Amino acid sequence: MLHAVAIDDEPLALEVLKSHARQLDFILIDKTFTNALKGLEYLQKNKADVLFLDIKMPDKNGLDVATLLPKNIQVIFTTAYAQYAVNGFELNATDYLLKPISLIRFTQACNKAKKQQENIKDEDNLIIKENGAWHKIPAEQVLYVESQGNYLKLVTRNRNYLVRQTLYELEKQLPSYFARTHKSFVINTRHIDRIEPHQVSIGFTAIPVSETYKKELFNILGLKN
């Protein structure tokens, strides 16, 4: 199931999107916003797979909103203005829907988003070796990674893994929602429970945030440093 959010200053346009989504069994529009800034604030704190985003809005241009989104949210622009199409695709939009949006065209865009999400899920697996055995771990399940000498401790909710690998090597395999917080730690930002100036908490574990990595972490989270 794809979980979606829609932002459009026209309530009627949002009703059309919700009506179309009800015809499909693989996408659910969880929230809608007529105010772009409120929608952006929601997306910085809550997970969504797809964002249906109008472009020409009074409080914030949709193209600007797209540059501020957390990573791994697919954007489908919805607008009455065809001239913005090039700008939309330059921002790697999944699709660009011109109003009035038909159910057929809406379905095509959603199918494209579904396919891309499936590809992301295939890529979001870590293949690691522990004690001579290979393990395939969904990256989403990893809470954080800690460097311990020549080894890495991968912490998940179910168990920990001890892997002979460098943090730098593992970072190249991790999805974009992971962030380095310290020379010895990489965290899954989706599992953060509390943020403080010099540490974050995941569950009952406090993880240090050094000044070197603080700015990048706060950018990923959409927060001001």
Image (cartoon, rainbow, N blue to C red):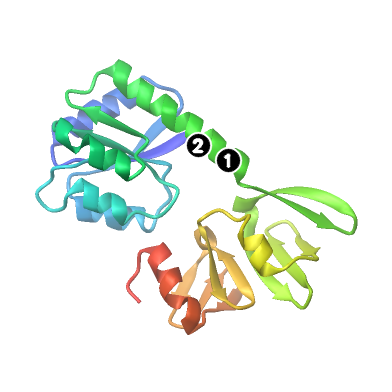
Viewer can see residue 157: yes
Amino acid carrying label 2: it is: Gln
Q: Residue 212 at what x, y percent from top left?
A: 49, 81
Residue located at (72% from left, 56% from top): 158
User: Tags 2 and 1 in contact by the CB under 8 Å rule?
Assistant: yes
Task: Examine the rendered structure and indicate whether residue 113 appears above or below residue 210.
Answer: above
Left or right position of 106 against 179: left
Front one among 145 and 5? 145
SS type, badge 1? helix
Q: Residue 27 at what x, y percent from top left?
A: 42, 30
Residue located at (31% from left, 43% from top): 90
Tag count: 2
- Residue 88's quadrant in the figure? top left
Q: Residue 5 at what x, y percent from top left?
A: 33, 41
Residue located at (80% from left, 65% from top): 162
Q: Which residue is mark 2?
A: 117
Q: Which residue is mark 1?
A: 121
Q: Find the distance from the CA under tag 2 to the CA under tag 1.
A: 6 Å
